[in-house]
């Protein structure tokens, strides 16, 4: 009679009454953390092998537990693992099932281990493994941009700053601007993954164990470079999760900008791109509508991970060292940001692959005034200081706007009206007249510019950075 | 008469009226960005040398401008540089002053450059340079923790999880838990600094230049590994600043936790530490108060950088590619988070250096019940499965609490009352009686644990990680 | 054959291909918005009655549709309503089912209505109805505090500022401080609910309808004071949801503070309260632990709604007027914050009802130094300026700390050592000696103070504010 | 010699050494809180009068202090008040100066008062007074929209949802959509101001006073409805500040949307509006640029207050009841959000007043397809169920897009090609041909719609709501 269990108390000689059902419900995390089942099993397997290696478990027990864990893995893989109401989290669920499968030896599984070090080990393994999948989705989107770039080295398109047309750019430069920003995130992600190299297992609740655990053994077995430095730091904080959320927030921000761009470019008043029917949705009221809902989701949802990051920082700030339950929100925040990011990257890829540029509209939007900097630079090459060149072209722009003239005419007029006009002015006014968007594009000579030679080189560089052939 | 300036318009042939004074005031950023004066001068110097090297500026012009820039540097260093009302930002202020100093050649300075690439170059240089200073302050705090650790390898102290006493730990383990978390941030910071390796200069407004600029030249001269990949990405985004803010937010979160810990430990009901008078403040009403205001500032202000990060993501999300004025908030957010972090790290260092532990209070807080895990582990070593060991000790804890007994007595009672009690029970109940906090501390055997051997090794490891002797 | 449906396109003569399955999945909101089924049915019922009243629907159609809507309501109430894969949202699900049930008339339901005005009507109805339930949970928590207050008018307890003991307060004052803050939130909530008085229905997509809809009719029928002012504002924004989230965030902040308080008070080093077993949980490793997980969830989760608020502001800022898909995140954010708040208020109530104060520990924590302000105030009553009184007591506090004396002795010593000491000093030093915490508590004379008379009056006042008997 | 001051210690008998200069600097708040000087003086004046009225101060002392406070007020008004290095905050600065001016009586000013209740009183007074100014700026912006509305009742303009043209709307409807949202914020603001009705003064540090203070007296004198309910709640929380920040965040979100709208409408590809030169700025590189920097600042900076709100919630969550230094960030956050909001509302007003719509462009953007809903509604009036009407018009839209036809032609074609086409189809196809944007606008019949009659009524309604003539 001695060890009678308090109902609903898996951890329990200590307690005289069952957990309040409301607290039990709010406290339960198994719906969230069960997705780490594979890592939890891997961690337990490594732990048990280590316990055997240092003599804390007999060979028989190691073998029984290992057999049980393997069976549980098969159940998960087959989708037959059955959670029970009383399973508080994935760790307790696995241990409960192990007990059903192998009996007494299962009660030795948790020797020298706390859920505090167990869950952080699971989580780091999960991030490392799933981090590779995230990497691939990210690379997939970059490649979609490269494909657009390669088709668009010679397709002129206005660049905008402040949403005002600035210069003649190209579809390739636009696509590569996104690719370049994403390559930056890829590098952040790789740095983040590389930092997941310390194994928390063996930290116990926060100060280690009285048993002769071999932390090097489990760290190696699980593919970490080393055991974590300090047992308290590696169980009582969530900086590794913040790290992930920080990069996801930055990725989200880039996705959000892409969304805005697609929404604006797809608006008939711009008309730069057409999205296929399968990426637009209708209106329940307005029969003619083809709405870029997907692009708007990129824009809106892309902003969310930053709040998840801020939420985790807020939740874990102001806590004492050592584990506190407040930390449990980490997985809710991480997984929702992670899944959202995967979805958004995938959805973004669909859009980038599918978008068709309307070259006629792009060319039509390359108004003559986009030659303004070219004109100023030619004046510079003729010897004028840039500030004066800028001023003369500015006067022309103003005259053009006030008198309804295009740049060439307006510049010619301004030149003609001033005694002190630059000598090269007349010649350049003439050159301007025949200048096409293609000429302006070809005139861009610098590395990283929209010039076709540059964008071709950028494609090669990006491909190298993402590890492509 | 032709080039008459519109009042308050430095960029002006285009405009027929002056900027609205309210917009001018809100738009002006010189109060914020002037702290990048040194980087702005360095960037201009490199730019001008490059312009000379490719023949866009004459040797005389290069030499005049260089002389002017050097003179301006001296003015800043001497504190004599005078800003004027019309200086919109640091870039225009420097160019205005250069014109006053060297005349016409100054009007050639901005050849082939936009403020868009200029400001990002300044900012990346600033982060790289000041990033080293931040690194030092961070290392300083880590060292303060190491000093505390070295003094406290053998000073017992309860560890807490959920603010409930857990096991006997040590002052060293506590100090090292902070050091270890900060070392993680140091690694993040170094990774961040290493990613600041692409020079934006030469990107122009967003699509490059028609002039034959040599971007490799400026990149090298300014200490970057290469020119930025894509002109639009490197002028129209602020991911580099987000990167900094992300790490600062994580550092802030660790500082905030330290603050809470100091506040709690300094409360007389804990009484673990005493802060010196110089780090406490009084009350205007209650004469007896010695308040840990500094620690509370660590806790409260440490939470703020996460909002600065979220603010920058929010402000820059949902924008079209290419520069937009919305990006200008980046420096306000960055500098305030940066200065705050420097202050907080410094203030934290002051506290950690000054805090005196009350060993008597720490020992008194190491109640006998903190031997619970030791007891369970001994039962394990005697052959009991851990879950049964856990249960027996739990029963003892409950009995202790219900009958007002300390662990040893309570365990002895529980053992005596059950026929199926573990054989080793009686022996262990006796061993428990004489067990001191020092014994428990010494019994911690694992890497990363609070055991004195482990904490000594941790100090060595941390010292290595921060590059110390 | 003419109206062949594109697969998966409910809205669709316009479309030549089906929606991409990935977009369809991400775009679908029925999992989130189905909880508004009751409001959606109520809104449709009112809409249909109005369409009948202005002659846009025949009596037969009105009656058929009404019958169908009533049947659907029964299905939802019975839990038998079956969603289908293709149901994009609750609105389409209801219309689809209505068509199954009543056939052709169902195709007239959406006359003069857009999902844009429909969803905002549903949501405002939902917030109004569920807002009453939230109000009740909030009042329930306030009442739990009142119960604690009534039991604790005469139970001394230290007040803290900066976590340093400040004065003798009472359990009642502590409970009432929470009640008072929550009463402030209740007022905010009531103000918020009162502002939900404009009915969006009839706004259409954003500029109204060509049909002679009677918006007064539907507004009245649904219990709104009036139709919304401007069709675009009432469909294209989410300020009503922000409004809710703002108050929830503030409630959360108060709950978080309560959580911290419970965690600290329950720590053995304070020992002010004991939580029952049913509100604590065990450790998987440490057998003796009774952790206040519930209180920690209050503290941690209470911080989250502020991020939900910031997320909604971020997601909806920077959008053009008129509906955009970005707004769809509103319900995800609202419902999760709403449910979390309900849970936390309920859980907080459980804790407040259950918490047992340890009067002996509370009294023991009321150290003599808590009489410091009393002493200073007595000196003031004897004629001393407060600043001098403050200074004398401060000297005593310092002497006490340096020489290990309690306040009375220390003050007597300081008085004896100074020629210019206040005359009343000697008398007061004696009075101090016998002063109990109860005396100090009783000495608090001001409205809102911890004095028993004041706290009794506060209970009456709070009860009045929450509308109790 | 007895009361020798510790250097830099205004609160001092307690302390043996001066505050650390770094802590002193970080702790000092006078730069931030000095803007409450007027409220601080008003609060002190009311406090002193009350102290006199209950006999705690002599008539002479009251009169001396009052005289001093009046003199200090004059110094502030004249700009001659001189802060000193040692002034920690506005409260200590005023008391220090008062001591200089009136000597001993000044040392009685702080009788029965703590900075905790003093600062909250100052802050609530400040918000109440400055809240009226904020109200006026907000009303000013609403009035600017009303002016635009009145000029634009009959100016057609496309409405957008998802940035896709939806229906013919009007400039008035657009302006009123902003006005309506802002009127909602005005109501929130008024509710917030009304809640600032409880006077904290007399709460002391957190549990009241031993002196017979008359809190009703000061509450009345300062224009509050009553003293605050609970001394601890009214000094240890910042919900009143959160309340303000919540509304400011919502206002910011609306401003941000206006900014986006102006940026898009001012882009030449839309060309709906022209901003005057004084509200645009130039580019340092591109001579032709006229950038809407002001509008972009509205968009970007409008997002910031939400983070300030979240920051305050984060900073004050997880704290024990009773004042903690963490709360000090409240004023930094409040004032920066407040000033920013004032600036943005003013800047928004400048833009709204100045913006000139290009009617030709607006009309040109009202493409024939915007009649789609009108067409569907006419089919409904001819007896067709709406869903069928929607489908037929959808088919026409698709045909139009595929065959390059405008709506009328496309609809005629679709009608002709189907045997089961609606009878009214042919007639409506003809009616469509001559339909102008003005006809469509005039056809909007519902309250709140863009129809001219509706927008005229909306103007009247808004004017009434803002309390205009």
Image (cartoon, coloured by chain):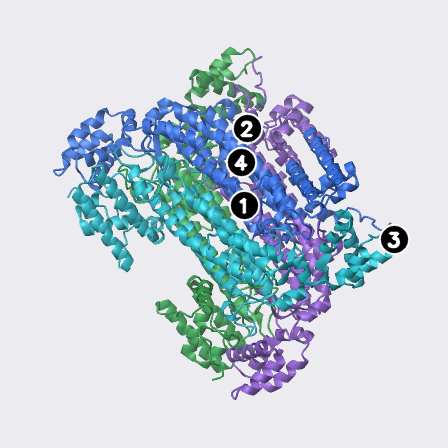
Chain colours: A green, B purple, C cyan, D blue
Q: CA distance from mark 4 to mark 1?
A: 15 Å
Is B321 on the left-hand or right-hand side of D173?
right
- Per the image, label 4 sits on a secondary structure element best described as helix
* In this view, the mark in front (4 or 1): 1
- Mark 2 lies on residue: B23
Q: Is residue A110 above or below residue C414?
A: below
* In this view, the mark in front (1 or 3): 3
* In this view, the mark in front (3 or 2): 3
Is D80 on the left-hand or right-hand side of A147?
right
Mark 3 crowd level (few <14, some 14–19, many ≥20, 10 Å Cα): few
Q: CA distance from mark 1 to mark 3?
A: 51 Å
Which numbered circle lies on residue D242? 1
Of residue A291 and residue C70, the one placed in the foreground of this image is: C70
Quarter location, residue D268: top left
Mark 1 crowd level (few <14, some 14–19, many ≥20, 10 Å Cα): many
Query: Marks 1 and 4: in contact by CB < 8 Å?
Result: no
Query: Marks 4 and 3: in contact by CB < 8 Å?
Result: no
- Mark 3 lies on residue: C419
- Per the image, label 1 sits on a secondary structure element best described as helix
Horizontal and vertical percent for residue B97?
66, 26
Q: Taking the image as drawn, is residue B401 in sight?
A: yes
Q: CA distance from mark 2 to mark 4?
A: 14 Å
- Per the image, label 3 sits on a secondary structure element best described as loop
- Mark 4 lies on residue: D341
Horizontal and vertical percent for residue A272?
37, 34
């Amino acid at each position: 009679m001695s060890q009678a269990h308090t109902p609903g108390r898996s951890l329990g000689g200590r307690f005289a009454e069952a957990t309040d059902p409301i607290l039990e419900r709010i406290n339960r995390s198994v719906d969230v953390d069960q997705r780490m089942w594979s890592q939890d099993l891997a961690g337990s397997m490594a732990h048990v092998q280590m316990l055997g290696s240092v003599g804390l478990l007999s060979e028989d027990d190691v073998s029984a537990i290992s057999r049980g864990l393997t069976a549980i893995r098969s159940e998960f893989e087959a989708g037959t693992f059955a959670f029970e109401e009383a399973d508080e989290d994935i760790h307790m669920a696995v241990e409960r099932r192990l007990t059903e499968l192998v009996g007494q030896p299962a009660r030795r599984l948790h020797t020298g281990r706390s859920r505090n070090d167990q869950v952080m080990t699971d989580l780091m393994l999960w991030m490392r493994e799933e981090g590779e999948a995230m990497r691939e989705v990210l690379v997939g989107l970059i490649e979609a941009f490269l494909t657009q770039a390669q088709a668009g080295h010679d397709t002129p398109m206005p660049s905008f700053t402040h949403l005002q047309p600035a210069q003649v750019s190209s579809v390739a430069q636009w696509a590569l601007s996104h690719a370049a920003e994403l390559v930056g995130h890829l590098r952040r992600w790789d740095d983040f993954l590389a930092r997941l190299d310390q194994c928390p297992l063996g930290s116990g609740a926060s100060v280690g164990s009285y048993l002769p655990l071999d932390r090097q053994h489990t760290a190696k077995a699980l593919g970490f470079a080393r055991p974590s430095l300090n047992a308290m730091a590696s169980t009582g904080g969530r900086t590794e999760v913040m790290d992930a959320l920080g990069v996801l927030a930055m990725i989200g921000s880039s996705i959000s900008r892409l969304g805005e761009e697609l929404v604006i470019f797809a608006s008939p008043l711009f008309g730069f791109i057409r999205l296929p029917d399968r990426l637009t949705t209708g209106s329940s009221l307005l029969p003619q509508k083809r709405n870029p809902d997907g692009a708007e989701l990129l824009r809106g949802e892309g902003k969310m991970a930053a709040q998840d990051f801020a939420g985790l920082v807020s939740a874990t700030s102001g806590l004492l060292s050592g584990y506190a339950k407040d930390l449990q929100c980490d997985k809710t925040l991480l997984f929702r940001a992670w899944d959202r990011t995967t979805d958004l990257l995938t959805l973004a890829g669909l859009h980038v692959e599918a978008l068709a540029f309307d070259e006629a509209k792009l060319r039509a939007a390359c108004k003559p005034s986009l030659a303004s900097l070219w004109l100023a630079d030619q004046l510079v090459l003729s010897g004028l200081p840039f500030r004066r060149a800028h001023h003369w072209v500015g006067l022309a722009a103003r005259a053009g706007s006030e008198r309804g003239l295009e740049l060439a005419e307006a510049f010619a007029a301004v030149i003609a009206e001033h005694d002190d006009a630059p000598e090269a002015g007349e010649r350049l006014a003439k050159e301007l007249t025949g200048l096409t968007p293609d000429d302006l594009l070809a005139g861009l000579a610098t590395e990283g510019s929209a010039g076709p030679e540059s964008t071709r080189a950028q494609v090669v560089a990006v491909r190298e950075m993402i590890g492509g052939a």
